[in-house]
């Protein structure tokens, strides 16, 4: 596999770290010299400035992973590299999106056929960008897989670390639930989509158990032998506008299609298995 990654962020790096025998080139917002990250060639791209070597590397690649979020003007990758992307012989394209495109469903279950009701500008942009990538795939005859990710957690990014650093809060909004997904399970889903190829598709990448956020914090505190922070009512809690906006969407995300059609078998079916494994590895431990 000759993989090109637009946006070597948290999720993409976890996928790349597990690859063996692949040639990988990826972009980062900051320029770096030579190679890094176990042989991954890293080129600078911040949406405006781009390393001139990117187009040549795209032409040499056969698999594309995109994890760059939309900007106010749309998709920065398509805006800058549409021509080069259309000219490359892609075996498969994977675009990382978000379950935020579903918006609010009043706590009901959603699947890939559910209505898209994005409640924020950033998620409305996601819907448009998903369609733009699917359109590109149809135009050039390449399968495009859209992976809609639930709330991401994993090493260094989890409730255990938040508790130890004093950043965890137990915000309570009655009936509110969220799905989550461990970085290792995102990596699994990316790999399955690349192996599938085919005609492409849209896939929810989420755990099996949507749960109230305050329950997750309480469970993590128990693993660390800590007293959980006090509960705070959502209406009165001090939150940033972005943090508050997440609570405007309430839904339960089904991963049944991903399991049924791609053979997804989550390593961490719920937050409990994921947090136990992270605690066992030392996450949240006292220094």
Image (cartoon, rainbow, N blue to C red):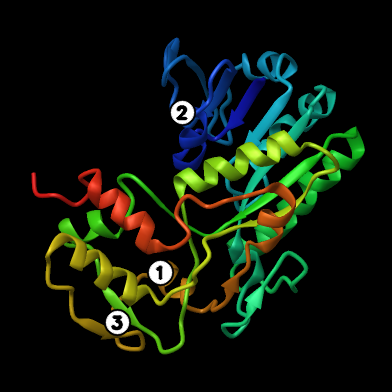
Q: Which mark is residue 17?
A: 2
Question: What is the quadrant of the N terminus in the image?
Answer: top right
Mark 1–mark 2 CB contact (< 8 Å): no
Mark 2 vs mark 3: give the one in front.
Answer: 2
Location of residue 252 by image quarter = bottom right
Residue at the spot of label 3: 237
Q: Residue at x 33, y 50 (%)?
A: 157
Tag 3 secondary structure: loop
Residue at the spot of label 1: 243
Q: From where the camera sits, is residue 224 visible? A: yes
Tag 2 secondary structure: helix
Q: In the image, is residue 54 above or below residue 270?
A: above
What is the number of callouts on the image? 3
Q: In the image, is residue 121 above or below residue 192?
A: below
Mark 2–mark 3 CB contact (< 8 Å): no
Extreme left residue here? 287
Q: Nearer the viewer, residue 252 or 61?
A: 252
Q: Residue at x 12, y 64 (%)?
A: 225
Q: Nearer the viewer, residue 119 or 62?
A: 62
Query: How many C-alpha atoms fall within 10 Å of the one at disc 2: few (<14), some, or many (≥20)?
Result: few
Tag 1 secondary structure: helix
Mark 3 vs mark 1: which is more N-terminal? 3
Residue 177: give x, y in percent of width and height. 47, 77
Extreme top residue here? 34
Q: In the image, is residue 103 above or below residue 13?
A: below
Location of residue 268 by image quarter = bottom left
Q: Marks 1 and 2, Cα distance to the nearest angstrom?
A: 30 Å
Residue 33: give x, y in percent of width and height. 42, 12
Mark 2 vs mark 3: which is more N-terminal? 2
Q: Marks 3 and 1, Cα distance to the nearest angstrom?
A: 11 Å
Residue 64: give x, y in percent of width and height. 68, 31
């Amino acid at each position: 596999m000759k993989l090109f990654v637009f946006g070597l962020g948290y999720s993409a790096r976890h996928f790349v770290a597990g690859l063996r025998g692949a040639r990988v080139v990826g972009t980062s917002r900051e320029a770096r010299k030579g190679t890094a990250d176990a042989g991954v060639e890293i080129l600078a791209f911040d949406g405006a400035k781009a390393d001139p070597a990117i187009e040549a590397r795209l032409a040499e690649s056969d698999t594309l992973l995109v994890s760059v979020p939309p900007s106010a003007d749309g998709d920065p990758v398509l805006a800058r590299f549409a021509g080069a992307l259309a000219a490359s012989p892609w075996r498969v394209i994977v675009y990382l999106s978000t379950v935020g495109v579903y918006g609010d469903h009043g706590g009901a279950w959603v699947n890939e056929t559910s209505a898209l009701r994005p409640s924020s500008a950033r998620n409305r942009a996601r819907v448009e960008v998903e369609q733009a990538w699917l359109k590109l795939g149809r135009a050039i005859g390449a399968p495009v897989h859209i992976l809609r990710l639930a709330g991401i957690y994993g090493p260094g990014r989890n409730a255990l670390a938040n508790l130890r650093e004093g950043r965890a809060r137990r915000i309570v909004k009655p009936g509110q639930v969220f799905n989550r997904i461990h970085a290792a399970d995102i990596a699994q889903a990316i790999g399955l989509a690349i192996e599938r190829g085919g005609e492409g598709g849209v896939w929810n990448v989420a755990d099996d158990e949507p749960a109230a956020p305050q329950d997750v914090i309480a469970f993590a505190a128990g693993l660390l032998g800590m007293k959980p922070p006090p509960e705070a009512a959502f209406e009165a809690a001090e939150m940033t506008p972005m943090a508050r906006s997440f609570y405007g969407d309430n839904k339960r995300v089904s991963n049944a299609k991903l399991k049924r059609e791609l053979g997804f078998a989550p390593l961490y079916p719920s937050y409990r298995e994921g947090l136990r494994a992270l605690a066992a590895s030392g996450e949240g431990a006292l220094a």
